[in-house]
Image (spheres, rainbow, N blue to C red):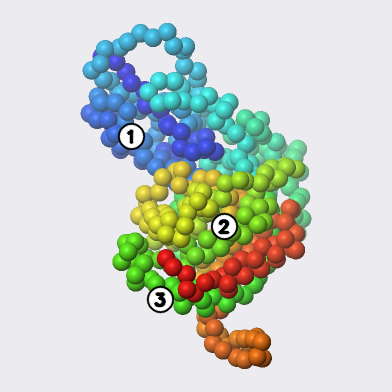
Amino acid sequence: MAITNVILPKLGESIVEATVLKILKQVGDAVKVDDTLMEIATDKVDSEVPSTAEGIIEEILCKEGDVVKIGAVIVKIRTSKEEVKSERPQPSPAIHVNGNGKQQKQEILDTNVPYVPSSQVVKKQEGSRFYSPLVMNIASSEGIALSELENIVGTGSDGRVTKNDILQYINSKKSGQTAPFQGHTNFSTTQQQVQQLFSSSGNVDVIEMDRMRKLIADHMTRSKSTSAHVTSFAEADVTNIVTWRDANKVNFEKREGEKITFTPLFIEAIVKCLKKYPLLNSSVFGNEIHIKRDINIGMATALPNGNLIVPVIQQADQFNIIGLTKQVNRLANSARNGSLQPNETQNGTFTFTNIGTFGSIMGTPIINQPQVAILAIGAIKKKPVVIETDQGDSVGIRQMMFVSMSYDHRIIDGALGSMFLNEFVKHLEAFDINREI
C-alpha cells in the first residue's frame, strides 16, 4: 500500500490561494483518477480539483470555507501500489489557514503535480495589494474600509497583510494607540456606524451578497482607490457597420456556424487603436509603467444571476474577424454556463464592455485593475444627423452610438485619452460596407 498526496494545483499566474467551497468526497470513499474531490474558488473563477490517483481516501486535510495555499496537500489517497523509497528531499511546510482563523502546517510535495516554490509563486499582485478572504472578512466585520486597509503595514510575503497584522491593528485602534484613518475626514463614518444609523426595520428585505458579488464589490472599490479615473465621451456614426452586419449575418452563420454580433467588430477596432497608442495597453507598478506587448482583450460578460465576469481573448491581434467572432461566442457561452477555465480570465490588458445590450446609451465604466483603461459602447439609436458633403449639408437618418472610455489619469492625460477615443470612432465610421467575409 502507498499514500498519494493530492495538492492544490496552480490555477493561474497571480493566484496563490483558493477557498474551499464544497467537499464532494468523504474519508473511506473509493475514487478513480479524475474524479472530482472538491470545488474551490479564487478571486477569478470557480474550479474543481480532480483526483490524481485511484484508491481510497485516507485523509482530507481541509474543510469547507478554508483558505488553502497553492501547492498544499489537501487530500491523501491510499492506493494499491507499493511504496517506492526515494531520495527526494523532505517536503517543506506550508501554512494553511482554516475558516476559524487557526493556522496549521501542511506538507508541500514536489511529487504528483509539478510544484513551484512559494518564493516564486507569491508575487506582488498587479495594480494593488492582495487581501486574502480571511483578512477581508475580518475587515468587513470590524467596519474597516479598503482605503483604511491599504494603510496597514503588512508583515507577510511582499508586504501582504496577515491575520495577525489586522488583528493587531484592530486592538491598537480600540485601545486608542492608533488614530483612525484620516484619508477622507468628511467621510469617516464606518460601515458599522452606518448600519447602526440605518438599522433594518420590519419593512426591509435583507439579501446576503454571494461570494462573487463580494469579490466584484471589492475589486471595483479597490480600482477607484487605486486609479485616478477620468472618462471621455464621443459619438460614432455606425451606419456602415449596422448595414454590413444586416446584409451578411445570415450567410456568415451558414458558412461559419457562428452568429456574428457587433462585439468582434468593435474589438477589431480597439486592437488597431492599441497598436497606434500602446500606452493604453499598459499597467502601473509604483513609479514604473509596464507597456504590454501582448494585446489581450477582456470582454465584460453579464451572468444569468446578475453578476459580472471578464473572460479574456488572448492575443486578440492575431485573429481575423472570423476568429474573433468564434472567440467571443465561445468565451461568452462558457461564462454563462459556468465552464470558464481559470486561465481564460487571466492576463487581460484592456477591457471592453457593451452597456448598450441593456439599453443604456452611455456610461462611466470602472477600470479593471491592473489595466489603465476600459471602453464602453452604448445602445445604437437612429437619429437625424447633419451630413456634410461637397455639395452642401443635408439631414439624414443615421445609426448613432455613444462611446465612453475611463482611463487612469496617473499616466494618461485627457489629450491622449481623447485621441484614442477619436481614433476608435474613425475606424468605426470608415468601415468598408463592401467588405468581404
Image quadrant containing the N terminus = top left
Residue highlighted by disc 1: 50
Residue at image position (62%, 36%) is 124
Mark 2 highlights which residue?
A: 271
Residue 264: percent from the left, percent from the top?
47, 62
* Element type at mark 2: helix
Q: Residues within 10 Å of mark 3 (few under 14, many from 20)?
A: few
- Would you say the residues marked 3 and 2 are in contact, meaning their CB atoms lie under 8 Å apart? no
Q: Residues within 10 Å of mark 1 (few under 14, many from 20)?
A: some
Q: Residues within 10 Å of mark 2 (few under 14, many from 20)?
A: many
Q: 340 or 219, which lies in front?
A: 340
For label 3, the residue is 247
Q: Tell me residue 282's x, y (percent).
A: 65, 49
| Mark sitting earlier along the chain (2/1) | 1
Between the C-alphas of marks 3 and 2, the distance is: 24 Å
The relative height of residue 391 versus residue 88 in the rendered view (above or below) is below
Name the residue: 49% across, 65% down: 265
The image quarter containing residue 60 is: top left
Can residue 222 be seen at all in this image of the molecule?
no
- Amino acid identity at mark 1: Pro
Which residue is depicted at the point 36% across and 36% down?
A: 49
Amino acid at circle 2: Val
**In this rendering, position of residue 304 left or right of residue 371:** left
Q: For the point 66% across and 52% down, which residue is it?
A: 278
Within the image, what quadrant is residue 127 found in? top right
